[in-house]
Amino acid sequence: MVTLAGPARRSVQRMVAGMATVAEPKIGATKVPMSLLEPNTAINYQRIEDNLVIVRDRLKRPLTLSEKILYGHLDDPVNQDITRGASYLKLRPDRVACQDATAQMAILQFMSAGMDTAAVPTTVHCDHLIEAQVGGVKDLARANRINREVYDFLATATAKYGLGFWKPGSGIIHQIILENYAFPGGLMIGTDSHTPNAGGLGMIACGVGGADAVDVMAGIPWELKCPKVIGVNVTGKLSGWTSPKDIILKVAGILTVKGGTGAIVEYTGSGLESLSCTGMATICNMGAEIGATTSLFPYNERMGDYLRTTKRPEIAAYAKQFSHNLRADEGAEYDQVIEINLSELEPHINGPFTPDLATPISKFAAEVEKNGWPTEMKVGLIGSCTNSSYEDMSRAASIAQEAAAHGLKTKSKFTITPGSEQVRATIERDGQMATLEDVGGLVLANACGPCIGQWDRQDVKKGTPNSIVTSYNRNFTGRNDANPATHAFVASPELVTALAFAGDLRFNPLTDTLTGSDGKPFKFSDPSGFELPPSGSYDPGENTFQAPPEDRASVQVAVSPTSERLQLLKPFTPWDGKTPTDLPVLIKVQGKCTTDHISAGGPWLKYRGHLENISQNCLIGAINSENGEANNVKNQFTGEYGGVPKVAAEYRDQGIKWVVVGDHNYGEGSSREHAALEPRFLGGLAIITRSFARIHETNLKKQGMLALTFVDPADYDKIQPSDKVDILGLESFAPGKNLTLAVKHADGSKEEIPLAHTFNEGQIEWFKAGSALNLMAAKAKARAAGQA
């Protein structure tokens, strides 16, 4: 605990009203568990309080909410450089969360670090490996059968290292976090890009790669480039068909998929009072699609209501006591401000193929016709981590109930994905599930399912153009069903439900009518529903949580050397200290290249714990600028064409390092670090782009790869797929100092192109050591030797 001497303390107390941080008695005198499942770990508001006294005295300006929470978690508030958009903050997160697909690699790395217990509370959630086929119960049973090896590994590893384990069927990681672990003012990292969902409870929650998670689990501060802060001032009031989802759909249209990069999106204004806690979580969840570091809401009584309903009244009371630090200071300045008037906001539908193509419902039919999008809606899919709350299901069920009263069933196929076992059991108890099933809905497992491509879709052949509408968050090409011709659109659950009864994208439920079974036209009423269960409590359903055992010494974690799904990691080779020369361009990527393009999901998810096997999907979705084709590149030494992983491995096995050249916002989308591990495993040295998505850039650095950008983005056009390059300047590699790309074209001509980077001193050491994990292991070995 930090205690300030008289002058510093008095200077803070003299600051204007609304900025006080010193409370009497001390906030830390009250001990409130962070979670009912972790009764011995208390919320540390005192650290935030003490840190902010120091930071305020240094900065002497009002703070945004995101600054309060971030700076309140600084490892060294006295000496930390604090400059938005420039400094690298060293932070102490309160907890870590991992989903099963990324947890495998994170735990394998943690095991390599030689630790025996996680330094902070950590949980693992089984939600990604359950494929949607025929329905929840049978799909879950099948997943348990085919993923047994992975689930057993995760169950024993979490028991061994003191982690909480949520079994298959428990629900989606972000919903479980909101129900059990999120709290106002907390700081969490999670190995999934939609971790920001917890911002709906006033928590800074950031998606990261597994190596970042390992750092925090090992007791090392988490490093984050000090974010800029985008303010979204919300006025007016939600009503009618407009939902919280429409706020983020609108914001995505304004900021685009890269407009939030390097920034926290912080919501303010009087309009927030009309948003539910789970509605705010929806907005924060999909904030990942604009590239934001995270999104965040100030504490209010809607959050308090949710905490009390989820049996956490003590946290609600504690947050209210600390509320002066759970909202922005009066006069806090933002780097950009967006205005949203809820009273004027229309429902939106975003897509296809990108989540930032935003169209209000009043103009959507015309856009469908103008662009020639398939008008028939083949499937409507509601739920997922973004929109599967009790409120979402209630509002969707109100539409289904009205349609049923007119004798209708859905024209489109219609699926429902509950976000958690708690939501599933509660909507079963309260009748919404039966309502949705009675009109033709199929309830899937409490898991990610089609949202991440875990969908055994059989109604259309691959390559057939078709349209689907989901209440999910992401709609990149082939994302949901691996069909590049599927036009996927994103909307609110109630709008998706209404469209499922029309079966036509051009239907506008605000103005258009449907014909009932009696032959009479009717127009849907506005959706209605309950924010929280009217009974005042959720049905917890089946208990799917495994706490770590008291005696962990006897737990054995087995990884078979012949396994096709799990593989122990070997350290990457350190930099040899030499200037890299004659590096072939493996592929010059044309256009959008998300982590789905770099490391595909769907059927590849089963290999997330086996680096060698999953590397066979490296960049197979990226488009080669040379021929406009995916997964077809030229080996510059043999002249033969082959798949990207094949050619990359051929180079590696000949001792030849290679580079990838990419376009804007390279690596947007998921937090999956496999998109960085795979090129590293296959012998890559550098990824050179016009710009990077935040998480992917960090993941590349963590694995010892050079993440470099063109100083002039137009220089991307100078690179040819047949080029070989040298990277000059690594012998004096330093923060803020450009490197040089010496390009050798196939015709014999040469040119030099300046390259920028964002490496700091510590990250440069990662590169030299071969990876952040190598450096961690070397330091641990040195400490052990010093203690011997």
Image (cartoon, rainbow, N blue to C red):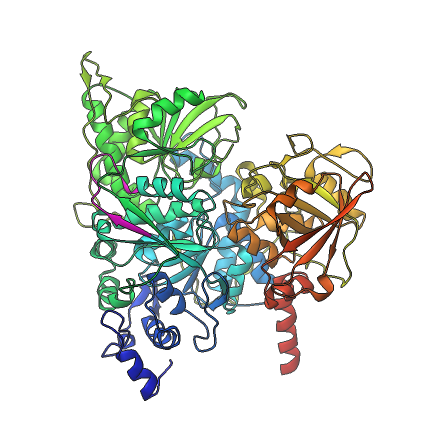
Q: Quadrant of the C terminus?
A: bottom right
**574 left or right, relative to 604:** right
**Residue 149 image offset from top left, x and y in percent:** 55, 47
Does 565 appear above or below 591?
A: below
**Foreground residue among 210 and 712:** 712
Q: Is residue 375 magenta?
A: no
Q: Which residue is at a point 64% across and 42% down the rendered structure image?
A: 618
Q: Quadrant of the N terminus?
A: bottom left
Q: Can residue 66 be seen?
A: yes
**Foreground residue among 121 and 471:** 471
Judged by its main secondary structure, the magenta piece is loop
**Foreground residue among 99 and 542:** 99
Does 411 appear above or below 66?
A: above
**Residue 545 image offset from top left, x and y in percent:** 38, 54
**Residue 538 image offset from top left, x and y in percent:** 24, 48
Q: Which residue is at a point 51% across and 33% down the rendered structure image?
A: 477
**219 left or right, relative to 396:** right
**Residue 113 image offset from top left, x and y in percent:** 60, 65
- Extreme residue toward the top, this view: 519
